[in-house]
Image (spheres, rainbow, N blue to C red):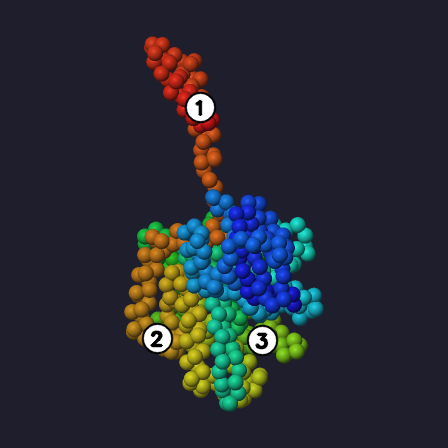
Amino acid sequence: MASTYSSFNLRTTQEKFYIEACDEGSEEVLAVDRVSTEMTLTVKRDVPAGADSRPICGLMGTIRLVAGNYLVVITKRRRQQDFHVQINNVLHTDGFYLPRTTTDAHSAAPGQHQPEFQEMSLLERADQRFVWKRTSAENSLHSQAQATAVHKFVFPVIHGFIDMRSSCINGKVFEWSIISRRSCFRAGVRYYVRGIDSEGHPANYLQGFFCSDQRLHPLFWSQRPNLKYKPKPQISKTVNHLDGFQRHFDSQVILYGKQVILNLINQKGSEKPLELAFDKMVADLGNGMVKYIAFDFHKECSRMRWHRLQILLDMVAEMQDELGYFLVDADGKVLLHQDGTFRSNCMDCLDRTNVIQSMLAQRALQSQLRKMGVLHVGQQIEEQVAFGKMFKNAWADNADACAKQYAGTGALKTDFTRTGKRTHWGLVMDGWNSMIRYYKNNFSDGYRQDSIDLFLGNYAPKDWKFLTLPIVMVVAFSMCIICLLMAGETWTETLAYVLFWGSASKEKLD
């Protein structure tokens, strides 16, 4: 694989930024013009001796704001720079990670063990759906050779949650991870980003590395905050839902294989129309690779009957075994392929979804540990008390992190995820988090959504003064002509009007 430098110095002059690679024996320097943003490769001896210097960890890209272009760099593994407040708002969000290994940056996909793939840089190998970079650095380069070299400076930053642990069962030590990656397409916050777009990208798309993904209903629908505790979802009546729906599932089947949809929303009340529409779309799609299962989570688990979640697990157990999991040995030889994923969702794809995902993940991990000989035949993860507690807490941490990024608070129902039991204290904490969500969703999430759109380039800021001044000038000049054509009652009145509007237009011209 084309290596990526591990440490850098940012050298600054009035004309250029110089990003020096500080690895042993490296002489390459990436020069960035501060006006044109043109990037060129040079060597350390070409950097002016008087340039200011500071250590950095890498480069994310460039961003254009009203005052001009800015360079987004990574400093001391922190997500901050002295940019505008909205950019800081995004960069200060928890959950940004710098992948130092390839497994964090790309999916387990066919061809990844081919020599051509192995020779690619970390940025080139990364799945671009999950790379949170504002402007690709290579867009400012003149050749592919330069672009390849620049990849040694640029890191594919991902957003979501990563937890890596080491455990021991039956005297055998192993490492396991939970990785959730948030898509940069249709990214945003609760209530402000719902449904899908015309390209089939769903809101709040999180890819999990155990056995499933989570994303919102792939329909054109909205749920704008209106001071009500739970705004009524609105399904669009003016668009072709099947078009976006098919685009979404066509891409999922190509990428992952079979899709088992687990729809966990209520089958009555305001959520019922979404469930009915989802069911109808699957039937209209007629794709044998897509299977739909509706499970009314709240109804089944009402009155603290959370043991009834086992009904769903038993329902999908055979399907999960058929889908399998991806397994590769230390030499890169693929031993097993995963033939599909579970696509789970509720209204937010946070609370109910994470509970089900954690249970599916535990079952998948149990099968993997048996395959590797860590668990004996017939042994259950539930019997490993210390490991079971660690595993459940990791999944609850994952739920809290992903919920904060989308809804502004930790996840609901995490008492069950952490302990396997629903508690009255858990209900109290859910009420507290729900109140905080209500306030944030109605009074602060709009600003947060604007910040994300600005950061990802979905909104390009404009300096309105350059549009306003010509308009004012035209109006002033027009009024001056009108005053000449439509004289006042006296010549002094006409002269006053002409002088006023004439001086206004002259000031704008100056």
Q: Residues within 10 Å of mark 1 (few under 14, many from 20)?
A: few
- Across and down, in percent, residue 455 comes to 48, 53
Q: Amino acid at mark 2?
A: Arg
Mark 3–mark 1 distance (CA, rounded to whole Å) = 75 Å
Which quadrant of the figure has residue 242?
A: bottom right
Residue under the point 41% across and 57% down: 190
Q: Which mark is residue 506?
A: 1
Mark 2–mark 3 distance (CA, rounded to whole Å) = 30 Å
Residue furthest to the right: 115
Residue bearing the label numbered 3 = 324
Tell me if label 1 and label 2 are in contact, CB under 8 Å: no
- Across and down, in percent, residue 339 comes to 60, 71
Q: Amino acid at mark 1?
A: Lys
- Specify which label sits upstream in the sequence, 1 or 2: 2
Tag nearer the camera, 1 or 2: 1
- Left/right placement of residue 490 relative to residue 366 reads left
Mark 1–mark 2 distance (CA, rounded to whole Å) = 73 Å
Residue bearing the label numbered 2 = 422
Choose between 506 and 283: the one closer to the eye: 506
- Across and down, in percent, residue 473 comes to 45, 26
Above-or-below relation of 327 to 221: below
Choose between 332 and 254: the one closer to the eye: 332
Q: Amino acid at mark 3?
A: Gly
Choose between 280 and 184: the one closer to the eye: 184
- Across and down, in percent, residue 412 comes to 37, 67
